[in-house]
Amino acid sequence: MAHRFSSNTSPLNAAVGTSIPSIDDFSNGFTYESHLGRFCKNVIVVSARHPHSFFLQTIDDLTFSDNFFSKMNEFYNRCFDAQRLVISKAALRVNLCCVARDEIESDVWNRAQLLEYYPESDQCSLLLVDIGTWQECVPRSNLRHILLPFRQECVRSVPCRLAGIAPAKTEKNCLWNECNITDAIKTFRNVIDNVPAEVEVLDCSPNGSYFVNLFVTHDTFVCVNDFLLYHKIAIPVDDCKTLKPEELDPTTHEPFLAIIHEFNLQGELLAEELKANQRQQKEEQRKKHEEQQQCQSNCRLPCIRIIDIPFLSDKKLIFARYNNWVMLPWFSISDLFHPSLSENTIERFALLYKFSPVYLTPLNNAVLCANLEKYMASINDNRKTSSHGYETKIALYSIDCVRKLLLNHHFVNEFIFERLDEAREAEMKDDQDFWEIPSQNQLLMEHKKLNEESKQSQMAVLKSHKDRLEYRLEQTKPSDPNYKSIQSQLMDAVEKLSIFSNDSNSSF
């Protein structure tokens, strides 16, 4: 549980009562107050992300905790006019100061600042100011307006960073939060966890973070800065207080708090990772194209299975057979939710939890892509496939990713989870009966009929793609760096169209 702070001011005492004092809807941040001296012996570590982002608090400040937070908790737990404090969608904005229910203890409330709102899922990302960390996927229903006296109480958790060091091993950005140095961060957290601490303040950054030397006592008195250097987890550097443009608020030109900048940076790194994954996926699909096409043409099993969900006649589970995997297309996943989730929301969730989607195109799997487009059109929600340049792409997600997403949104439909378990077992055992259940014979015939009806559509897609490439090749000079790439794509398209035409009498 987070450390709390208290205040004995009269406005705060007046906040707990039968009526609601003034609500603060206009503030864009909290006031941070540091009681750290040049050298302070009695400090505790409130939270720690990595050596350049952790929060300290003096023991003296800790003594203020019980009164302030007990009054705030009492108010939000017992307020008779609580409905007035619920934050509407219209009131949400970036940097809004608010109060959020704790995700573990429902009767505990944390002061927070809104970082981002996701309307598709009605969830938020918050900075928990007194704890010194952010929290994602927080339901809007857990937020409340903050009262003026609660907002005016200063934040006594002090943002700090170890002075004179940088990570010894990084990929490119020299940042501690890069994924390849998690062991180093774990070591740092273990060293400072639950031990007496002292701090020497050396300087302060314009963004409010203090450059410090941190000391802890285990069997001996240890300087954490020197410990990381000695074990080659960090390297010595000269600290820089000059902020980069991206560390400033583009509207006010004031510095972001370091932890808010890190949150923004994580989103940028996630976007870069998405692009890298897409490039890698496209290359892997190209290399395996011939093998996939041969496997698909030889296989007589249907490539799709559709299951009606009881009591939800308009909802269906659509499973796609991709190589040896059983996967679900994004639009089928989206349709399980109300309101439906956007394609970007599902993709962002998958990458956040390290699930890589598979992207289908008419070139890497024409049959499956065309079938999914047909079923996608049958879902009456006006969805369209994603178009990237000249290619149509449909994202597929693994069973584990879908299960994680459903659990995150507190799904309770056991039928859906049972069907996911069956699909997972069929995937592990390569069980072809999963696709040929007797009770599904009529559905399988419908699949075959749909495949036959979509044949001309698939050929039209390939021919249209070939025509575009021919036009681009005519408009491109041989000296252009893209000329050979376009020429190669055109040859591939012609070959695939020829194979597809010759196989027009084959079964799907």
Image (cartoon, rainbow, N blue to C red):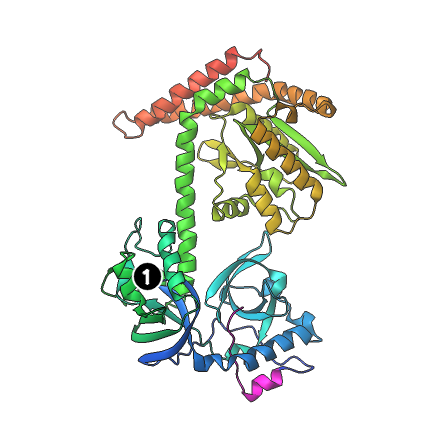
> Given the image, on which type of amino acid does mark 1 rest?
Pro
| Residue drawn at the location 51% of the way across and 10% of the way down | 502
**Quadrant of image for the C terminus:** top right
Specify whether 27 is left or right of 243: right
Specify whether 164 is left or right of 65: left
Q: Give the range drawn in magenta.
A: 1-15
Q: Would you place residue 343 above or below residue 212 in this image?
A: above
In the figure, residue 237 lies in which quadrant? bottom left
Specify whether 264 is left or right of 116: left
**Quadrant of image for the N terminus:** bottom right
- Secondary structure of residue under mark 1: helix
| Residue drawn at the location 60% of the way across and 14% of the way down | 507
Residue 172 position, x and y percent, is 30, 50
Residue 465 position, x and y percent, is 46, 25
Instruction: For residue 249, say whether it is visible.
Output: no
Q: Which of 495 and 180 is in front in this view?
A: 180
Say if the magenta span includes residue 2.
yes
Q: Nearer the viewer, residue 232 or 490?
A: 232
The residue carrying mark 1 is: 245
| Residue drawn at the location 74% of the way across and 25% of the way down | 439
Looking at the image, the residue that sits furthest to the bottom is: 10
Q: Which of 467 and 60 is in front in this view?
A: 60
Instruction: For residue 358, say whether it is visible.
Output: yes
Residue 489 position, x and y percent, is 38, 24
Determine the main secondary structure of the stretch shown in magenta: loop
